[in-house]
């Protein structure tokens, strides 16, 4: 599963295990912390909620997801600390994927290819061939 940079995540889940006996941690307060791109540690905006059988869930904000590498740490007085490293995908990947599924129109006289947004009218990217058949100059609209 991929995580998009600067996009909120709903229901990021994890499991907490009691450090004394290995049983599921099902109550109490869980504190969540974040580091972004190796920066300072900060508290997460939202608090984790217990879902059942030791599984906990938290919503991460778009701001918290606005980094290339995100470190998440969850701690509870009775639990083994849990850490996750998330590598996000750049926002441009989403736009590039959109270009591939949307409408493209080529002018037969000039060879120019225009890729349109979902509305079919807003140009996203224009490809303009040069004189050489082996190269294409790409100019963002």
Image: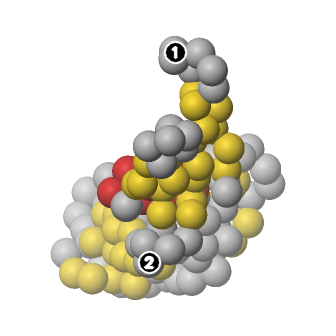
Which quadrant: the C terminus? bottom right
| Image position of 23 (left or right of 119) | left
Describe the element under mark 2 as helix, strand or loop: loop
Residue name at image x 63 percent, y 47 percent: 68
According to the image, label 2 marks what residue? 119
Between residue 61 and residue 32, name the one nearer to us.
61
Please determine whether, in this image, residue 45 is positioned above or below residue 39: below
3D distance between C-alphas at marks 1 and 2? 31 Å
Name the residue furthest right: 40
According to the image, label 1 marks what residue? 134
Circles 1 and 2: CB atoms closer than 8 Å: no
Res 28 → quadrant? bottom left
| Image position of 128 (left or right of 105) | right
- The image position of residue 132, as x and y in percent, is 59, 15
- Which mark's residue is nearer the viewer, 1 or 2? 1
Between residue 79 and residue 10, name the one nearer to us.
10
Residue name at image x 51 percent, y 17 percent: 133
């Amino acid at each position: 599963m991929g995580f998009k940079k600067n996009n909120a995540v709903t229901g990021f889940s994890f499991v907490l295990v009691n450090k004394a006996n290995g049983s599921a941690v099902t109550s109490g307060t869980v504190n969540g912390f974040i580091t972004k791109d190796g920066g300072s540690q900060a508290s997460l905006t939202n608090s984790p909620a217990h879902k059942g059988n030791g599984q906990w869930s938290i919503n991460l904000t778009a701001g918290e997801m606005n980094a290339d590498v995100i470190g998440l740490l969850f701690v509870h007085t009775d639990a083994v600390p849990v850490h996750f490293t998330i590598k996000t995908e750049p926002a441009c990947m989403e736009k590039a994927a959109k270009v591939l599924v949307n409408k493209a129109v080529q002018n037969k006289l000039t060879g120019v290819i225009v890729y349109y947004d979902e509305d079919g009218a807003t140009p996203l990217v224009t490809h303009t061939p040069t004189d050489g058949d082996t190269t294409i100059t790409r100019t963002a609209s």
